[in-house]
Image (spheres, rainbow, N blue to C red):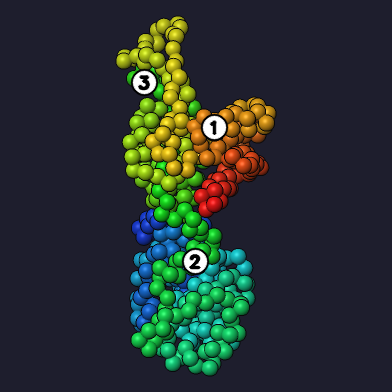
Amino acid sequence: MNLKNYESKLAAKKKIIKNHPSLDIVSSYGVELSGKKIVLCVAGSVAAYKAIELARLLMRHGADVRCVTSDAVTKLVQPDYFKWATGNAVITKLTGELEHIKLADYNQSDLIIVYPATANTLGKLANGIDDTPVSTVLTVGFGSKIPILMCLAMHASMYENAAVKKNVEFLKNKIEFLAPQQTEGKAKATEPEEVLDYVLKKFGFSSILKNKKVLITAGPTIEYIDPVRIITNQSSGKTGMLLASELISSGAKVTLVYGPGSEKPPKGVKIIKISTSNEIFNVVKKEMQNKFDIVIMAAAISDYIPENPSKNKIKSSKNKIKISLKKAPKIINFIKKYQKNVFLVGFKAEANIPKNELITLAKKKMNESNADMIIANDIGSKRYKKNPENNEVLIIDSNKVISSGWIKKEKIAKLIIKEIENKIKI
């Protein structure tokens, strides 16, 4: 086989793995592990079958999971099960591809989990022995200082062995351990759900918003001049989508009322699509009957709408037409009337005004709507028009004004959610 054919077949193989159907579950429960590369080392214990469930849980929260198995594991669980679970090729032996370096060298992965971790695997790591794919990956990861989490599993008598205790003592300040469950004469591996909780907390998962019911509006609205022509604005809905993602990642139950924006909603939200300001008003009014903990009004709702939209298409032969606009109701002003105790967040966008004036207008809106927090920004600045992926917002509440600085919208969303958490936990 010549080099060109080899590269072609390799590229095709990678494409197949990339499009593996199992990847459809990624981020279906949340995105808090999105972008995280996790190596799942599976040692030779009968608890190995639970590693499949753990891999799927990590993926459902956004992680990219790569499995490494020892020879002993392949006698208990076929490698194809791990490939099915993760959508990625399984490392069962080391080859000239240098799999251990690709997975565990400096900054190649974010976390190595050993699940289940046997006394044998523990001992090899503590003593620098690397004679299996699992132990070699661990040796490299240990040296490159990639965080390692060991979930021990063995008979209780093995766990009490002085040598095992010595190995744990040597490693306890160098890697992380999840203690086994002592039951039925065995030190059983921690359940996959508990491992997931540990990993989520490690990567900054916040439980303050867990199970909180949140209603968020996002995207633009459109207002019909006639059946084919509309008035709208340039909102993409990105900030709203990022906020929804952060809320899902925090364990919140999110209902998203979404106008015709260009951004894709995150997995895990209940989506209600709308088009006009009248539709969003009616949907929000109806949804508020379900009682929410938090309402975030991030949609760019039209301030003015056509007073008498034409039922027929306006003829293009006319040289001039006049459109009369009327003021649309401010939906945010009704939220506290529907539910007095809800935490309400509003947005205030202005263009080309001084910062002190922006703050004054934002506080006025906060008072009029009885909102708990207003996010204000100037979308008319040259730097915003040049790079709309960045922004600077002012987070305003009754006590303070926080400036985000000129940063990515992803970081702004995290900052807003953090401030909401701080206010709620008081």
- CA gap between label 1 and label 3 equals 38 Å
- Rendered location of residue 234, percent (x, y): 50, 30
* Residue 399 visible within the image: yes
| Tag 1: amino acid | Asn
Q: Residue at x 49, y 72 (%)?
A: 113
| Residue placed under numbered mark 2 in the picture | 199
Are the two marked residues, 1 and 3, in contact with CB atoms closer than 8 angstroms? no
Q: Name the foreground residue: 5 vs 408.
A: 408
- Rendered location of residue 386, percent (x, y): 63, 34
Q: Residue at x 40, y 45 (%)?
A: 292
| Residue placed under numbered mark 1 in the picture | 367
Q: Earlier in the sequence, mark 1 or mark 3?
A: 3
Q: Residue at x 44, y 15 (%)?
A: 325
Are the two marked residues, 1 and 2, in contact with CB atoms closer than 8 angstroms? no
- Label of residue 228 in the image: 3
Above or below, 239 against 267 in this view is above
Helix, strand or loop at disc 1? helix
- CA gap between label 3 and label 2 equals 51 Å
Above or below, 281 against 186 in this view is above
Number of marks? 3
| Tag 3: amino acid | Val
- CA gap between label 1 and label 2 equals 41 Å
Mark 3 closeness class: few <14, some 14–19, many ≥20 residues within 10 Å: few
- Label of residue 2 in the image: none
Q: Earlier in the sequence, mark 1 or mark 2?
A: 2
| Tag 2: amino acid | Val
Are the two marked residues, 3 and 2, in contact with CB atoms closer than 8 angstroms? no
* Residue 261 visible within the image: no
- Rendered location of residue 67, percent (x, y): 45, 71
